[in-house]
Amino acid sequence: MAKEKRLFEPLTSEEVKVYACGPTVYGDPHIGNFRSFIVSDILHRWLEYSGYNVKFVMNITDIDDKTIRDSALSKISIKDFTKQYTNSFLRGLDLLNIKRASAYPRATEYINQMIEFIQILLDKNIAYITEDGIYFDIDKYPEYGKLSGVNLTETQKTDRIKKDEYEKDSIQDFALWKKSTPEEEQRSKQEEGIAWDAIFDYKGKTVQMHGRPGWHIECSVMTRSLLGDTLDIHAGGEDLVFPHHENEIAQTECLTGKQFVRYWLHIRHLMINGKKMSKSLGNYVSFDEVLSKYSADAFRYFYLNTHYRRPLDYTEDAMLVASNSIKKLENTLDLIENSLQKTEEKLDYGSEEEKFLRKVIEEKKSFETAMNDDLDSHTAIESLHNISGAINEYLTGQINKGVLLKTQQIYVKLLKVLGLFEKNSKISDELTEKLIKTLINLRNQYRKEKNYQKADEIRTKLSQIGIILTDNNEETNWKIEK
RNA sequence: GCCGGGUUGGCUGAGCGGUUUAGGCGGCCGCCUGCAGAGCGGCUCUACGGGGGUUCGAAUCCCUCGCCCGGCUCCA
Protein backbone atom coordinates (compact mmCIF):
# COMPACT_ATOMS: atom_id res chain seq x y z
CA MET A 1 0.00 0.00 0.00
CA ALA A 2 2.74 2.37 0.90
CA LYS A 3 4.58 1.44 -2.28
CA GLU A 4 7.64 0.59 -0.30
CA LYS A 5 9.52 -2.50 0.75
CA ARG A 6 8.58 -3.91 4.09
CA LEU A 7 10.04 -6.68 6.16
CA PHE A 8 8.16 -9.86 5.48
CA GLU A 9 6.52 -11.48 8.46
CA PRO A 10 3.95 -14.17 7.84
CA LEU A 11 0.58 -14.01 9.51
CA THR A 12 0.98 -17.38 11.10
CA SER A 13 4.10 -19.35 11.68
CA GLU A 14 2.73 -22.58 10.23
CA GLU A 15 1.97 -21.51 6.74
CA VAL A 16 2.53 -18.71 4.28
CA LYS A 17 -0.45 -18.04 2.05
CA VAL A 18 0.36 -16.79 -1.40
CA TYR A 19 -2.00 -16.02 -4.25
CA ALA A 20 -0.89 -15.07 -7.73
CA CYS A 21 -3.17 -13.94 -10.50
CA GLY A 22 -3.02 -16.46 -13.28
CA PRO A 23 -4.07 -16.41 -16.90
CA THR A 24 -7.36 -15.85 -18.63
CA VAL A 25 -7.39 -18.87 -20.89
CA TYR A 26 -8.48 -17.42 -24.19
CA GLY A 27 -5.27 -17.94 -26.15
CA ASP A 28 -1.77 -19.32 -25.96
CA PRO A 29 0.17 -17.46 -23.33
CA HIS A 30 3.04 -15.34 -24.59
CA ILE A 31 6.38 -14.65 -23.00
CA GLY A 32 5.12 -11.45 -21.47
CA ASN A 33 2.64 -13.40 -19.38
CA PHE A 34 5.42 -15.63 -18.26
CA ARG A 35 7.40 -12.86 -16.69
CA SER A 36 4.91 -12.72 -13.88
CA PHE A 37 4.66 -16.51 -13.67
CA ILE A 38 8.43 -16.83 -13.42
CA VAL A 39 8.62 -14.17 -10.74
CA SER A 40 5.90 -15.79 -8.68
CA ASP A 41 7.76 -19.07 -9.14
CA ILE A 42 10.85 -17.46 -7.64
CA LEU A 43 8.76 -16.11 -4.79
CA HIS A 44 7.41 -19.59 -4.23
CA ARG A 45 10.85 -21.17 -4.27
CA TRP A 46 12.46 -18.51 -2.14
CA LEU A 47 9.83 -18.81 0.58
CA GLU A 48 10.34 -22.55 0.66
CA TYR A 49 14.11 -22.18 0.73
CA SER A 50 13.62 -19.81 3.66
CA GLY A 51 11.91 -22.58 5.55
CA TYR A 52 8.28 -21.59 5.18
CA ASN A 53 5.54 -24.01 4.44
CA VAL A 54 3.96 -22.35 1.45
CA LYS A 55 0.44 -22.69 0.20
CA PHE A 56 0.56 -21.22 -3.24
CA VAL A 57 -2.55 -20.69 -5.33
CA MET A 58 -2.83 -19.41 -8.88
CA ASN A 59 -6.24 -18.94 -10.43
CA ILE A 60 -7.37 -19.66 -13.95
CA THR A 61 -10.04 -17.40 -15.38
CA ASP A 62 -12.17 -19.49 -17.68
CA ILE A 63 -15.27 -17.34 -17.90
CA ASP A 64 -15.23 -13.74 -19.04
CA ASP A 65 -15.95 -11.59 -22.10
CA LYS A 66 -12.94 -12.83 -24.00
CA THR A 67 -13.40 -16.54 -23.47
CA ILE A 68 -17.03 -16.18 -24.52
CA ARG A 69 -16.17 -14.07 -27.54
CA ASP A 70 -13.24 -16.11 -28.82
CA SER A 71 -14.78 -19.51 -28.26
CA ALA A 72 -17.70 -18.33 -30.37
CA LEU A 73 -15.35 -17.13 -33.06
CA SER A 74 -13.55 -20.44 -33.18
CA LYS A 75 -16.89 -22.22 -33.12
CA ILE A 76 -16.12 -24.58 -30.27
CA SER A 77 -17.71 -24.87 -26.89
CA ILE A 78 -16.35 -22.65 -24.19
CA LYS A 79 -15.44 -25.69 -22.11
CA ASP A 80 -13.32 -27.21 -24.83
CA PHE A 81 -11.94 -23.83 -25.70
CA THR A 82 -10.76 -22.96 -22.21
CA LYS A 83 -9.52 -26.48 -21.62
CA GLN A 84 -7.31 -26.25 -24.65
CA TYR A 85 -5.69 -23.03 -23.45
CA THR A 86 -5.47 -24.19 -19.87
CA ASN A 87 -3.41 -27.08 -21.15
CA SER A 88 -1.31 -24.72 -23.19
CA PHE A 89 -0.64 -22.68 -20.07
CA LEU A 90 0.29 -25.76 -18.03
CA ARG A 91 2.56 -26.95 -20.78
CA GLY A 92 4.34 -23.60 -20.68
CA LEU A 93 4.85 -23.97 -16.93
CA ASP A 94 6.53 -27.31 -17.51
CA LEU A 95 8.67 -26.11 -20.37
CA LEU A 96 9.96 -23.24 -18.31
CA ASN A 97 10.39 -25.40 -15.26
CA ILE A 98 7.96 -23.48 -13.13
CA LYS A 99 7.18 -25.20 -9.89
CA ARG A 100 3.58 -26.29 -9.60
CA ALA A 101 1.36 -24.31 -7.29
CA SER A 102 -0.70 -26.01 -4.59
CA ALA A 103 -3.79 -25.37 -6.68
CA TYR A 104 -4.95 -23.82 -9.93
CA PRO A 105 -8.61 -23.14 -9.21
CA ARG A 106 -10.85 -22.36 -12.17
CA ALA A 107 -13.46 -19.66 -11.83
CA THR A 108 -16.28 -21.84 -13.17
CA GLU A 109 -15.79 -24.28 -10.30
CA TYR A 110 -16.57 -21.56 -7.75
CA ILE A 111 -19.79 -20.12 -9.07
CA ASN A 112 -21.85 -21.09 -6.02
CA GLN A 113 -19.40 -19.48 -3.65
CA MET A 114 -19.47 -16.35 -5.79
CA ILE A 115 -23.24 -16.20 -5.58
CA GLU A 116 -23.06 -16.58 -1.81
CA PHE A 117 -20.40 -13.89 -1.62
CA ILE A 118 -22.52 -11.48 -3.66
CA GLN A 119 -25.55 -12.24 -1.51
CA ILE A 120 -23.68 -11.14 1.59
CA LEU A 121 -22.68 -7.89 -0.08
CA LEU A 122 -26.33 -7.35 -1.02
CA ASP A 123 -27.37 -8.05 2.56
CA LYS A 124 -24.86 -5.50 3.77
CA ASN A 125 -26.29 -2.98 1.34
CA ILE A 126 -22.93 -2.60 -0.34
CA ALA A 127 -24.09 -4.01 -3.65
CA TYR A 128 -27.17 -3.18 -5.65
CA ILE A 129 -29.11 -4.80 -8.44
CA THR A 130 -30.01 -3.18 -11.75
CA GLU A 131 -31.64 -4.43 -14.91
CA ASP A 132 -28.44 -5.88 -16.30
CA GLY A 133 -26.44 -6.94 -13.30
CA ILE A 134 -25.27 -6.54 -9.77
CA TYR A 135 -22.82 -3.80 -8.92
CA PHE A 136 -20.53 -2.90 -6.10
CA ASP A 137 -21.15 0.57 -4.74
CA ILE A 138 -17.72 2.00 -4.13
CA ASP A 139 -19.10 4.82 -2.06
CA LYS A 140 -19.74 2.23 0.63
CA TYR A 141 -16.03 1.60 0.90
CA PRO A 142 -14.26 4.80 1.90
CA GLU A 143 -10.82 3.28 1.59
CA TYR A 144 -11.33 2.59 -2.09
CA GLY A 145 -8.21 3.52 -4.03
CA LYS A 146 -5.73 2.86 -1.25
CA LEU A 147 -3.68 0.38 -3.24
CA SER A 148 -3.40 2.14 -6.56
CA GLY A 149 -3.70 5.67 -5.33
CA VAL A 150 -6.21 6.47 -8.03
CA ASN A 151 -8.20 9.51 -7.31
CA LEU A 152 -11.57 8.73 -8.73
CA THR A 153 -12.77 12.30 -8.85
CA GLU A 154 -9.82 13.10 -11.06
CA THR A 155 -9.93 10.01 -13.18
CA GLN A 156 -10.43 11.13 -16.69
CA LYS A 157 -13.61 9.98 -18.26
CA THR A 158 -12.24 8.08 -21.17
CA ASP A 159 -14.33 7.25 -24.18
CA ARG A 160 -14.63 3.70 -23.03
CA ILE A 161 -16.16 4.68 -19.74
CA LYS A 162 -18.44 7.26 -21.32
CA LYS A 163 -19.68 4.65 -23.71
CA ASP A 164 -20.22 2.15 -20.98
CA GLU A 165 -23.26 0.17 -21.90
CA TYR A 166 -23.93 -1.07 -18.43
CA GLU A 167 -26.47 0.44 -16.21
CA LYS A 168 -25.02 1.48 -12.92
CA ASP A 169 -25.42 4.28 -10.45
CA SER A 170 -21.90 5.56 -10.62
CA ILE A 171 -19.49 4.97 -13.45
CA GLN A 172 -16.83 3.71 -11.13
CA ASP A 173 -18.98 1.00 -9.65
CA PHE A 174 -17.99 -2.38 -10.93
CA ALA A 175 -19.91 -5.51 -11.82
CA LEU A 176 -20.17 -8.43 -9.44
CA TRP A 177 -22.61 -10.36 -11.58
CA LYS A 178 -23.57 -9.81 -15.17
CA LYS A 179 -26.91 -10.77 -16.58
CA SER A 180 -26.55 -12.79 -19.75
CA THR A 181 -26.97 -11.03 -23.03
CA PRO A 182 -29.50 -12.45 -25.51
CA GLU A 183 -26.66 -14.08 -27.47
CA GLU A 184 -25.28 -15.63 -24.32
CA GLU A 185 -28.72 -16.90 -23.42
CA GLN A 186 -28.92 -18.48 -26.83
CA ARG A 187 -25.59 -20.19 -26.43
CA SER A 188 -26.23 -21.32 -22.91
CA LYS A 189 -29.16 -23.37 -24.13
CA GLN A 190 -26.72 -25.57 -25.98
CA GLU A 191 -23.70 -25.65 -23.74
CA GLU A 192 -22.55 -25.33 -20.17
CA GLY A 193 -20.14 -22.78 -18.84
CA ILE A 194 -21.71 -19.64 -20.30
CA ALA A 195 -24.34 -18.76 -17.74
CA TRP A 196 -25.62 -19.96 -14.39
CA ASP A 197 -28.86 -19.65 -12.53
CA ALA A 198 -28.59 -17.39 -9.58
CA ILE A 199 -31.22 -16.38 -7.08
CA PHE A 200 -30.68 -13.43 -4.81
CA ASP A 201 -32.66 -11.94 -1.96
CA TYR A 202 -32.80 -8.22 -2.47
CA LYS A 203 -34.82 -5.74 -0.48
CA GLY A 204 -37.26 -8.40 0.58
CA LYS A 205 -37.75 -9.73 -2.91
CA THR A 206 -36.38 -12.71 -4.73
CA VAL A 207 -34.46 -11.84 -7.82
CA GLN A 208 -33.52 -14.45 -10.34
CA MET A 209 -30.72 -13.56 -12.66
CA HIS A 210 -29.30 -15.93 -15.20
CA GLY A 211 -25.76 -14.76 -15.80
CA ARG A 212 -22.12 -14.99 -14.94
CA PRO A 213 -19.72 -13.51 -12.43
CA GLY A 214 -17.77 -10.31 -12.88
CA TRP A 215 -14.04 -10.64 -13.21
CA HIS A 216 -13.00 -9.31 -9.82
CA ILE A 217 -15.29 -11.45 -7.76
CA GLU A 218 -13.55 -14.59 -8.99
CA CYS A 219 -10.32 -13.82 -7.23
CA SER A 220 -11.98 -12.62 -4.06
CA VAL A 221 -13.89 -15.87 -3.81
CA MET A 222 -11.11 -18.24 -4.74
CA THR A 223 -8.60 -16.65 -2.41
CA ARG A 224 -11.07 -16.84 0.41
CA SER A 225 -12.12 -20.41 -0.29
CA LEU A 226 -8.59 -21.74 -0.53
CA LEU A 227 -6.56 -19.43 1.65
CA GLY A 228 -8.94 -17.74 4.06
CA ASP A 229 -9.79 -14.11 4.75
CA THR A 230 -6.28 -12.73 4.87
CA LEU A 231 -3.47 -13.54 2.49
CA ASP A 232 0.17 -13.07 3.26
CA ILE A 233 1.20 -12.23 -0.27
CA HIS A 234 -0.76 -11.44 -3.39
CA ALA A 235 1.16 -11.20 -6.66
CA GLY A 236 0.27 -10.25 -10.18
CA GLY A 237 1.12 -8.15 -13.20
CA GLU A 238 1.34 -4.39 -12.78
CA ASP A 239 -1.67 -3.85 -14.97
CA LEU A 240 -3.85 -5.48 -12.35
CA VAL A 241 -3.25 -2.88 -9.65
CA PHE A 242 -6.19 -0.92 -10.88
CA PRO A 243 -8.94 -1.78 -11.08
CA HIS A 244 -8.67 -5.52 -10.48
CA HIS A 245 -6.79 -5.62 -7.21
CA GLU A 246 -8.39 -2.48 -5.94
CA ASN A 247 -11.76 -4.12 -6.46
CA GLU A 248 -10.69 -7.35 -4.86
CA ILE A 249 -9.71 -5.43 -1.76
CA ALA A 250 -12.98 -3.56 -1.69
CA GLN A 251 -15.09 -6.71 -2.02
CA THR A 252 -13.20 -8.85 0.40
CA GLU A 253 -12.63 -6.25 3.08
CA CYS A 254 -16.24 -5.21 2.99
CA LEU A 255 -17.26 -8.80 3.42
CA THR A 256 -14.82 -9.93 6.07
CA GLY A 257 -14.03 -6.68 7.81
CA LYS A 258 -10.44 -7.85 7.90
CA GLN A 259 -7.30 -6.92 6.08
CA PHE A 260 -7.30 -8.76 2.74
CA VAL A 261 -3.64 -8.82 1.79
CA ARG A 262 -0.59 -8.15 3.89
CA TYR A 263 1.95 -7.74 1.11
CA TRP A 264 1.42 -6.93 -2.55
CA LEU A 265 3.88 -7.78 -5.26
CA HIS A 266 3.36 -6.34 -8.72
CA ILE A 267 5.41 -7.40 -11.68
CA ARG A 268 6.39 -5.01 -14.43
CA HIS A 269 5.35 -5.80 -17.95
CA LEU A 270 7.76 -7.17 -20.51
CA MET A 271 8.63 -5.07 -23.52
CA ILE A 272 9.90 -6.08 -26.90
CA ASN A 273 12.40 -3.91 -28.76
CA GLY A 274 11.43 -0.98 -26.62
CA LYS A 275 7.69 -1.35 -27.08
CA LYS A 276 4.96 -2.80 -24.99
CA MET A 277 4.37 -6.44 -25.80
CA SER A 278 0.72 -7.12 -26.27
CA LYS A 279 -1.70 -9.16 -28.22
CA SER A 280 -3.39 -6.16 -29.73
CA LEU A 281 -0.11 -4.77 -31.09
CA GLY A 282 0.65 -8.16 -32.55
CA ASN A 283 4.24 -8.03 -31.37
CA TYR A 284 4.05 -10.83 -28.84
CA VAL A 285 6.29 -13.86 -28.93
CA SER A 286 5.19 -17.32 -27.94
CA PHE A 287 7.28 -19.35 -25.56
CA ASP A 288 7.62 -22.07 -28.21
CA GLU A 289 9.29 -19.56 -30.46
CA VAL A 290 11.74 -18.55 -27.76
CA LEU A 291 12.47 -22.10 -26.73
CA SER A 292 13.21 -23.07 -30.29
CA LYS A 293 16.14 -20.66 -30.16
CA TYR A 294 17.23 -20.62 -26.55
CA SER A 295 17.21 -23.01 -23.64
CA ALA A 296 14.65 -22.66 -20.87
CA ASP A 297 17.52 -21.87 -18.52
CA ALA A 298 18.71 -19.05 -20.76
CA PHE A 299 15.21 -17.72 -20.82
CA ARG A 300 14.86 -17.86 -17.05
CA TYR A 301 18.19 -16.12 -16.75
CA PHE A 302 16.93 -13.39 -19.05
CA TYR A 303 13.93 -12.82 -16.82
CA LEU A 304 15.78 -13.00 -13.57
CA ASN A 305 18.72 -10.86 -14.50
CA THR A 306 16.51 -7.83 -14.08
CA HIS A 307 14.62 -7.01 -10.93
CA TYR A 308 10.93 -7.73 -11.31
CA ARG A 309 9.85 -4.14 -10.81
CA ARG A 310 12.18 -2.81 -13.48
CA PRO A 311 11.52 -2.53 -17.18
CA LEU A 312 12.70 -5.54 -19.14
CA ASP A 313 13.09 -5.47 -22.87
CA TYR A 314 13.09 -8.62 -24.95
CA THR A 315 15.72 -8.22 -27.67
CA GLU A 316 18.02 -10.59 -29.51
CA ASP A 317 20.98 -8.92 -27.82
CA ALA A 318 19.57 -9.48 -24.38
CA MET A 319 18.82 -13.12 -25.14
CA LEU A 320 22.30 -13.66 -26.50
CA VAL A 321 23.81 -12.24 -23.33
CA ALA A 322 21.57 -14.43 -21.23
CA SER A 323 22.39 -17.46 -23.32
CA ASN A 324 26.14 -16.98 -23.01
CA SER A 325 25.97 -16.12 -19.34
CA ILE A 326 23.96 -19.15 -18.43
CA LYS A 327 26.40 -21.44 -20.22
CA LYS A 328 29.14 -20.15 -18.03
CA LEU A 329 27.21 -21.04 -14.90
CA GLU A 330 26.37 -24.41 -16.34
CA ASN A 331 29.93 -25.23 -17.33
CA THR A 332 30.91 -25.09 -13.69
CA LEU A 333 28.53 -27.95 -12.97
CA ASP A 334 30.18 -30.03 -15.68
CA LEU A 335 33.64 -29.16 -14.45
CA ILE A 336 32.71 -30.29 -10.95
CA GLU A 337 31.33 -33.59 -12.26
CA ASN A 338 34.44 -34.19 -14.29
CA SER A 339 36.71 -33.44 -11.36
CA LEU A 340 34.83 -35.80 -9.12
CA GLN A 341 35.44 -38.58 -11.65
CA LYS A 342 39.16 -38.15 -11.42
CA THR A 343 41.10 -40.69 -9.45
CA GLU A 344 43.66 -38.30 -8.06
CA GLU A 345 42.59 -36.27 -5.11
CA LYS A 346 43.98 -34.14 -2.37
CA LEU A 347 43.56 -35.70 1.01
CA ASP A 348 44.72 -32.72 3.02
CA TYR A 349 42.88 -29.58 3.98
CA GLY A 350 45.03 -26.54 3.47
CA SER A 351 44.73 -22.81 3.19
CA GLU A 352 43.33 -23.09 -0.35
CA GLU A 353 40.41 -25.11 0.94
CA GLU A 354 39.91 -22.74 3.83
CA LYS A 355 39.91 -19.74 1.55
CA PHE A 356 37.72 -21.43 -1.05
CA LEU A 357 35.08 -22.49 1.42
CA ARG A 358 35.02 -19.13 3.10
CA LYS A 359 34.47 -17.43 -0.23
CA VAL A 360 31.62 -19.73 -1.22
CA ILE A 361 29.87 -19.34 2.10
CA GLU A 362 30.27 -15.60 1.96
CA GLU A 363 28.69 -15.53 -1.50
CA LYS A 364 25.88 -17.77 -0.32
CA LYS A 365 25.10 -15.19 2.32
CA SER A 366 25.17 -12.40 -0.25
CA PHE A 367 22.78 -14.41 -2.35
CA GLU A 368 20.41 -14.80 0.57
CA THR A 369 20.63 -11.15 1.50
CA ALA A 370 19.82 -10.17 -2.06
CA MET A 371 16.82 -12.46 -2.29
CA ASN A 372 15.53 -11.22 1.04
CA ASP A 373 15.72 -7.72 -0.34
CA ASP A 374 12.53 -7.81 -2.37
CA LEU A 375 13.62 -10.81 -4.45
CA ASP A 376 16.62 -9.09 -5.95
CA SER A 377 17.42 -11.94 -8.29
CA HIS A 378 19.80 -9.80 -10.29
CA THR A 379 22.14 -9.33 -7.36
CA ALA A 380 21.66 -12.97 -6.40
CA ILE A 381 22.88 -14.00 -9.84
CA GLU A 382 25.99 -11.96 -9.26
CA SER A 383 26.74 -14.18 -6.29
CA LEU A 384 26.23 -17.25 -8.45
CA HIS A 385 28.82 -15.93 -10.88
CA ASN A 386 31.19 -15.38 -8.01
CA ILE A 387 30.68 -18.89 -6.69
CA SER A 388 31.10 -20.30 -10.17
CA GLY A 389 34.34 -18.39 -10.54
CA ALA A 390 35.63 -19.53 -7.17
CA ILE A 391 34.87 -23.14 -8.00
CA ASN A 392 36.47 -22.95 -11.43
CA GLU A 393 39.55 -21.45 -9.92
CA TYR A 394 39.75 -24.10 -7.24
CA LEU A 395 39.43 -26.81 -9.86
CA THR A 396 42.59 -25.69 -11.57
CA GLY A 397 44.58 -27.07 -8.64
CA GLN A 398 44.58 -30.32 -6.69
CA ILE A 399 41.14 -30.96 -5.32
CA ASN A 400 39.85 -32.11 -2.00
CA LYS A 401 36.68 -34.00 -2.93
CA GLY A 402 34.95 -33.43 0.40
CA VAL A 403 35.36 -29.70 0.08
CA LEU A 404 34.32 -29.77 -3.53
CA LEU A 405 31.19 -31.76 -2.77
CA LYS A 406 30.24 -29.32 -0.09
CA THR A 407 30.53 -26.34 -2.40
CA GLN A 408 28.78 -28.20 -5.15
CA GLN A 409 25.89 -28.77 -2.82
CA ILE A 410 25.65 -25.07 -1.99
CA TYR A 411 25.94 -24.04 -5.62
CA VAL A 412 23.27 -26.47 -6.78
CA LYS A 413 20.94 -25.49 -3.98
CA LEU A 414 21.16 -21.82 -4.88
CA LEU A 415 20.70 -22.55 -8.58
CA LYS A 416 17.62 -24.48 -7.63
CA VAL A 417 16.17 -21.42 -5.95
CA LEU A 418 16.19 -19.76 -9.35
CA GLY A 419 14.99 -22.95 -10.98
CA LEU A 420 18.13 -23.33 -13.06
CA PHE A 421 19.58 -26.58 -14.43
CA GLU A 422 17.07 -28.83 -12.76
CA LYS A 423 16.45 -30.80 -15.89
CA ASN A 424 19.98 -31.83 -16.67
CA SER A 425 19.71 -35.02 -18.60
CA LYS A 426 23.27 -36.09 -18.86
CA ILE A 427 22.78 -39.75 -19.48
CA SER A 428 19.97 -41.07 -21.58
CA ASP A 429 20.52 -44.77 -21.00
CA GLU A 430 23.23 -47.30 -20.36
CA LEU A 431 23.47 -48.48 -23.92
CA THR A 432 23.92 -44.99 -25.29
CA GLU A 433 26.56 -44.32 -22.71
CA LYS A 434 28.51 -47.41 -23.65
CA LEU A 435 28.22 -46.54 -27.29
CA ILE A 436 29.56 -43.05 -26.77
CA LYS A 437 32.41 -44.38 -24.66
CA THR A 438 33.33 -46.79 -27.38
CA LEU A 439 33.49 -43.95 -29.87
CA ILE A 440 35.56 -41.88 -27.48
CA ASN A 441 38.04 -44.73 -27.10
CA LEU A 442 38.24 -45.16 -30.82
CA ARG A 443 38.86 -41.47 -31.28
CA ASN A 444 41.54 -41.41 -28.62
CA GLN A 445 43.19 -44.28 -30.40
CA TYR A 446 43.33 -42.15 -33.54
CA ARG A 447 44.64 -39.24 -31.53
CA LYS A 448 47.47 -41.36 -30.19
CA GLU A 449 48.29 -42.34 -33.73
CA LYS A 450 48.14 -38.65 -34.62
CA ASN A 451 45.39 -39.39 -37.10
CA TYR A 452 43.70 -36.12 -36.26
CA GLN A 453 41.56 -36.12 -39.34
CA LYS A 454 39.70 -39.23 -38.23
CA ALA A 455 39.63 -38.06 -34.61
CA ASP A 456 38.10 -34.74 -35.58
CA GLU A 457 35.61 -36.45 -37.81
CA ILE A 458 34.26 -38.44 -34.89
CA ARG A 459 34.06 -35.33 -32.74
CA THR A 460 32.33 -33.34 -35.45
CA LYS A 461 29.81 -36.02 -36.24
CA LEU A 462 28.93 -36.52 -32.59
CA SER A 463 28.54 -32.80 -32.12
CA GLN A 464 26.15 -32.74 -35.04
CA ILE A 465 23.83 -35.05 -33.15
CA GLY A 466 24.24 -33.03 -29.96
CA ILE A 467 26.99 -34.90 -28.16
CA ILE A 468 29.83 -32.63 -27.19
CA LEU A 469 33.29 -34.05 -26.53
CA THR A 470 35.87 -32.08 -24.62
CA ASP A 471 39.45 -33.18 -24.10
CA ASN A 472 41.12 -32.55 -20.83
CA ASN A 473 44.67 -33.50 -19.93
CA GLU A 474 44.22 -37.20 -19.59
CA GLU A 475 40.63 -37.90 -20.40
CA THR A 476 37.79 -36.97 -22.69
CA ASN A 477 34.49 -35.82 -21.24
CA TRP A 478 31.19 -35.78 -23.00
CA LYS A 479 27.81 -34.26 -22.53
CA ILE A 480 24.55 -34.00 -24.32
CA GLU A 481 23.87 -30.53 -25.54
CA LYS A 482 20.53 -29.19 -24.42
C1' G B 1 -4.97 15.87 -19.18
C1' C B 2 -3.73 13.28 -14.43
C1' C B 3 -0.50 9.57 -11.88
C1' G B 4 3.83 6.27 -11.79
C1' G B 5 8.53 4.12 -13.82
C1' G B 6 12.78 4.58 -16.88
C1' U B 7 16.97 7.07 -19.66
C1' U B 8 24.34 4.31 -17.60
C1' G B 9 30.32 2.04 -21.73
C1' G B 10 29.86 -2.62 -28.05
C1' C B 11 25.66 -5.48 -25.42
C1' U B 12 23.33 -6.70 -20.62
C1' G B 13 22.89 -4.46 -16.05
C1' A B 14 24.20 -2.51 -10.68
C1' G B 15 25.16 1.89 -8.21
C1' C B 16 21.49 6.47 -5.97
C1' G B 17 27.05 12.47 -2.93
C1' G B 18 33.49 11.10 -2.43
C1' U B 19 36.73 4.14 -1.36
C1' U B 20 39.70 -0.08 -7.55
C1' U B 21 33.77 3.80 -9.19
C1' A B 22 30.25 -2.92 -10.12
C1' G B 23 29.26 -7.85 -12.01
C1' G B 24 28.17 -10.66 -16.44
C1' C B 25 28.47 -11.04 -21.88
C1' G B 26 31.45 -9.71 -25.99
C1' G B 27 36.42 -8.37 -27.94
C1' C B 28 41.91 -8.83 -27.57
C1' C B 29 46.47 -11.26 -25.64
C1' G B 30 48.79 -15.21 -22.93
C1' C B 31 48.70 -20.28 -20.49
C1' C B 32 46.76 -25.10 -21.50
C1' U B 33 45.57 -28.17 -26.10
C1' G B 34 47.50 -31.86 -32.05
C1' C B 35 43.35 -28.55 -32.92
C1' A B 36 38.78 -26.98 -30.93
C1' G B 37 35.96 -26.26 -26.58
C1' A B 38 36.00 -25.33 -21.54
C1' G B 39 38.90 -23.32 -17.78
C1' C B 40 42.72 -20.07 -15.72
C1' G B 41 45.63 -15.31 -15.97
C1' G B 42 45.93 -10.47 -18.04
C1' C B 43 44.04 -6.49 -20.99
C1' U B 44 40.29 -3.74 -23.37
C1' C B 45 35.77 -1.10 -22.49
C1' U B 46 35.35 5.27 -18.24
C1' A B 47 30.00 5.50 -19.49
C1' C B 48 26.14 7.91 -16.99
C1' G B 49 19.72 11.69 -22.28
C1' G B 50 20.52 17.63 -23.12
C1' G B 51 21.09 22.26 -20.46
C1' G B 52 21.47 24.90 -15.94
C1' G B 53 22.24 24.98 -10.53
C1' U B 54 23.71 23.30 -5.26
C1' U B 55 28.49 21.36 -3.32
C1' C B 56 35.39 21.24 -1.93
C1' G B 57 33.23 17.05 -4.80
C1' A B 58 27.30 14.49 -8.56
C1' A B 59 25.60 9.16 -12.62
C1' U B 60 23.86 9.95 -7.54
C1' C B 61 20.52 16.21 -4.79
C1' C B 62 17.53 20.60 -7.09
C1' C B 63 15.47 23.09 -11.55
C1' U B 64 14.42 22.69 -16.66
C1' C B 65 13.91 20.46 -21.42
C1' G B 66 13.81 15.94 -24.36
C1' C B 67 12.83 10.88 -25.40
C1' C B 68 10.90 5.90 -23.99
C1' C B 69 7.50 2.68 -21.12
C1' G B 70 3.27 1.86 -18.17
C1' G B 71 -1.56 2.99 -15.49
C1' C B 72 -6.24 5.99 -15.63
C1' U B 73 -10.12 1.09 -20.41
C1' C B 74 -9.98 -5.92 -21.43
C1' C B 75 -4.72 -7.15 -20.51
C1' A B 76 0.39 -11.02 -16.69
Image (tube, grey):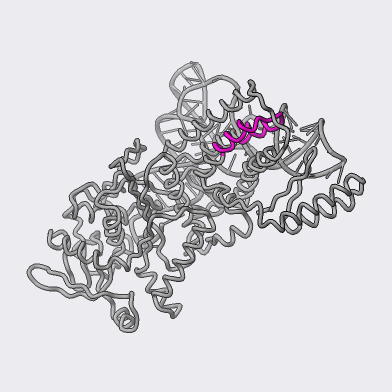
A189 is higher (above) or lower (below) than A391: below
Q: Which residue is drawn at 16% across and 54% down?
A: A140
What is the x, y in percent for residue A415? 54, 42
Q: Does the magenta stretch include residue A128?
A: no
What is the x, y in percent for residue A145? 26, 49
A387 is higher (above) or lower (below) than A255: above
Residue B32 shown left or right of residue A125 in the figure:
right
Give the camera-side residue of A412 and A150. Answer: A412
The number of numbered badges drawn on the structure is 0
Q: Residue at x 65, y 39 (%)?
A: A336
What is the x, y in percent for residue A319? 61, 50
Q: In which quarter of the image is residue A138?
A: bottom left
Residue A31 shown left or right of residue A162 in the figure:
right
Q: In which quarter of the image is residue B13?
A: top right
B28 is higher (above) or lower (below) than A464: above
A150 is higher (above) or lower (below) than A121: above
Residue A446 shown left or right of residue A21 in the figure:
right
What is the x, y in percent for residue A236? 39, 52
Q: In which quarter of the image is residue A342?
A: top right
Task: Check the image and name the residue furthest to the left.
Answer: A204
Characterize the magenta stretch by its predominant secondary structure: helix
> Which image quadrant: the N terminus of chain A?
top left
Q: Is residue A394 magenta?
A: yes
Q: Residue at x 52, y 61 (%)?
A: A284
Give the camera-side residue of A253 and A173. Answer: A253
> Which image quadrant: the C terminus of chain A?
bottom right
The residues colored magenta run A388-411
